[in-house]
Image (spheres, rainbow, N blue to C red):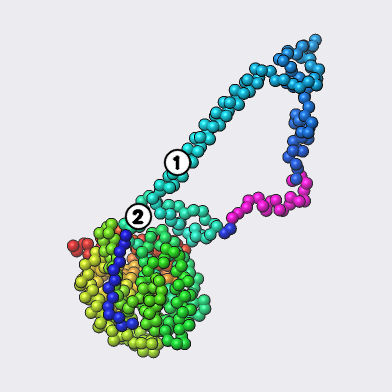
Amino acid sequence: MVKKKWAVRPSNVSKAMVFGLEDADSDASSDSDFHLDPIESFKNSPDSAVKSFAEPEALPGSLDSVENNTVLPQGADGMAQRAPLSNEPRRIPQSASSSKQMAMLIMAVFTGVCIGIALTVVIEIFAGFNDCSCDPCHGDSAASFVEGIAGPPPPPPPSAPPPASRLHFLVAADTGGIDDPPYTTLEQLTVAQQMGVVAERTGSEFTLLLGDNFYDNGIFSSVPENELTLARLNNTFESIYTHPALLTHFYVLAGNHDHYGDVTAQIAYTGLSDYWEFPDLWYTFTYSVPDQHTTVQVLMIDTQVAQKDWRMMRLGVFAKRDYTYLYDSQMKWIISTLEESDADWVLVAGHHPVWSVSQHGPTEELVEELIPLFEAHGVALYMNGHDHNMQHHRGTDGTSVAYLTLGNGGGSKIYAGTRHAEDVPEGSLRYYFYDNGGFMHVQVHNSSMLTFNFINQTGELLYTYDHLNPRSMER
């Protein structure tokens, strides 16, 4: 059983198919040849030995004309003469009757043995199904979940470990839909559907949402905007991530578009939702996997606050509140949390990228402030959104930090191009995807290795990477 503990800073804020129906309804009524009575056809056949089903008649020269095993006399031509027809009931010779009874008895015994064998096989098969310890899982395609089309889901492969022996979770960013009805996008819906598929197959424990949760200007908690706030919360979150396997925990942080509104409305929603977890602007939580004696700590930070120059963030114009005065408070919290962490794995999540070759490029403050901390304290992953694509950058100077951009969660347009390719360290970019929406699946195997997988909105596995834990290498 995977266990979790919290640490939060003091609060500031089908249908079935019927075969043959079309042929029966099409040209059948126009051609009488397609309506032949099989019985009449059989009666009128020139090869049939039956003249009438209503009035059976003995055939000349057949066994019906033989009585008491009498040998028919021969004529001059050596051919047997036909016996005269008799009106008496015919009698089957005793020897023939005994042979027939014996044959029927043998056939009955043989049939009984076959039925017994068949029943035994069926019972064994059902017994095997009942004893199976594997959890059922659906296939990769979303069509597997369309009612009435797909059959029962197959079991997972034999090599798949029990869910409790591994920690699985999902990550998506920039899932904020649109600010006009229906408040969502087709890309967000399809990404959410595939997230449900993967969550069910893997037994995912939680999902990270890395900011820009509500486009274009966040949400508001004050009157009269509260009715719109409820509509956005329902149509951009609650009614989107509805797959039962996703209904665990969504750990949320704020992006720049969330700060254009009132972030306290999103924080307050934590107390109203069964799944939305956003207790503060920055916080941490830890999961343990007892079977592997492994702990995983995740730090959720606010990278909008982490940027000291508020003019670069447009906060002075658009935001309900300016939180940039909290810069020093958050940095002290990040440093102390990393220093005090005794978890096997330490992962950090924010909205803005450290490294990116795309639209927004690297974030200067994060490069200067966070990279030294990550490298000093063995942080394994930094996960972010903001640029609407998927990127994997490796750490500078051969360090083991993986910088992962996951900003194509389906809420807005996709960013292509490499306008900032010269602004990242040479050779740092390992993978780049910008064709459509997507998300990431992470599997923590043990205290030494995890695997992260990039998956697009159609369920295709785009990229997989086995990542070694820098903390385990230091110990």
The reply, left or right, for residue 57 in relation to residue 358 is right
- Counting residues from the start of the chain, the first of labels 2 and 1 encountered is 1
Q: Position of residue 425 (x, y in %)?
A: 29, 72
Q: Observer-nearest residue: 51 or 130?
A: 130
Residue furthest bottom as drawn: 317
Residue 65 vertical placement versus 169 (above, below): above
Looking at the rendering, which quadrant does residue 15 occupy?
Answer: bottom right
Q: Amino acid at mark 2?
A: Pro
Residue displayed at 37% across by 69% down: 249
* Discs 2, 1 touching: Cβ within 8 Å: no
Residue 330 painted magenta:
no
Circle 1 Cα neighbour tier, 10 Å, few/some/many (<14 / 14–19 / ≥20): few
Residue 26 painted magenta:
yes
Looking at the rendering, which quadrant does residue 265 occupy?
Answer: bottom left
**In which quadrant of the rendered image does the N terminus lie?**
bottom left
Circle on res. 162: 2
- Element on which disc 2 rests: loop
Mark 2 or mark 1, which is nearer to you? 1
**In which quadrant of the rendered image does the C terminus lie?**
bottom left
Circle 2 Cα neighbour tier, 10 Å, few/some/many (<14 / 14–19 / ≥20): few
Tell me the residue that label 1 is attached to: 124
Please give the range of residues in magenta: 16-34
Q: Position of residue 380 (x, y in %)?
A: 27, 67
The reply, left or right, for residue 472 in relation to residue 356 is left
